[in-house]
């Protein structure tokens, strides 16, 4: 241990619970995007460790990588055809607040 540092007092389970709580807060009322994909998925809460849950694409789409850092919470409409085809996934999709959408200066004839 480095000088001036104290030993951690949290158990591994407490540390994992904080990760899960942080992800729940980050995805509250949001849909998700995997990495830089253009596809937006509804969120389902997938079992993780010790009965904790983490966000995952509601359609079951898998991804490879390091885990939670691969998923991005977005305030965008679900575009995944599998999520849109599933009543359960559609029910879990977060509504998009139109106030956060950019108005385009279009003049329609």
Image (cartoon, rainbow, N blue to C red):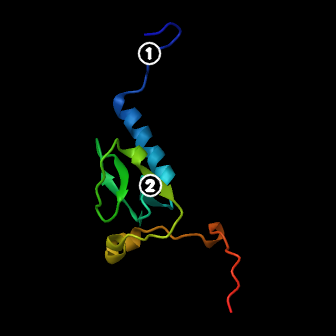
Residue at image coords 38%, 69%: 80
Which residue is the site of mark 2?
A: 36
User: How many neighbours does mark 1 have within 10 angstroms: few (below 14), some (14-19), or many (20 or more)?
Assistant: few
Number of labelled discs? 2
Q: Nearer the viewer, residue 102 or 41?
A: 102
* Residue 84 % position (x, y): 37, 75
Which residue is the site of mark 1?
A: 7
* Residue 64 % position (x, y): 30, 48
Residue at image coords 30%, 46%: 48
Label 1 secondary element = loop
Tell which residue pokes out farthest to the bottom in this image.
109
* Residue 76 % position (x, y): 52, 66
Asked if disc 1 and disc 2 are in contact, CB closer than 8 Å, the reply is no
Closer to viewer: mark 1 or mark 2: 2
Q: Say which quadrant the C terminus sits in.
A: bottom right
Residue 54: image tag: none
Q: Is residue 66 above or below residue 25?
A: above
User: How many neighbours does mark 2 have within 10 angstroms: few (below 14), some (14-19), or many (20 or more)?
Assistant: few
> Earlier along the polypeptide chain: callout 1 or callout 2?
1
Residue at image coords 33%, 46%: 52
**Quick check: 82 left or right of 41?**
left
Q: Say which quadrant the N terminus sits in.
A: top left
Q: Nearer the viewer, residue 99 or 19?
A: 99
Q: CA distance from mark 1 to mark 2?
A: 38 Å
**Quick check: 105 left or right of 93?**
right
Q: Nearer the viewer, residue 27 or 70?
A: 70
Question: Picture quarter containing residue 19?
Answer: top left
Label 2 secondary element = loop
């Amino acid at each position: 241990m480095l000088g001036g540092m104290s030993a951690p007092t949290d158990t591994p389970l407490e540390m994992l619970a904080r990760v899960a709580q942080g992800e729940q807060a980050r995805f509250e009322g949001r849909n998700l995007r995997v990495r830089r994909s253009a596809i937006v998925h509804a969120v389902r809460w997938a079992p993780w460790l010790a009965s904790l849950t983490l966000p995952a694409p509601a359609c079951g789409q898998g991804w490879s990588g390091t885990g939670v850092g691969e998923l991005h919470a977005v305030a965008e409409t679900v575009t995944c055809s599998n999520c849109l085809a599933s009543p359960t996934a559609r029910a879990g999709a977060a509504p998009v607040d139109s106030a956060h959408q950019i108005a385009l200066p279009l003049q329609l004839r």
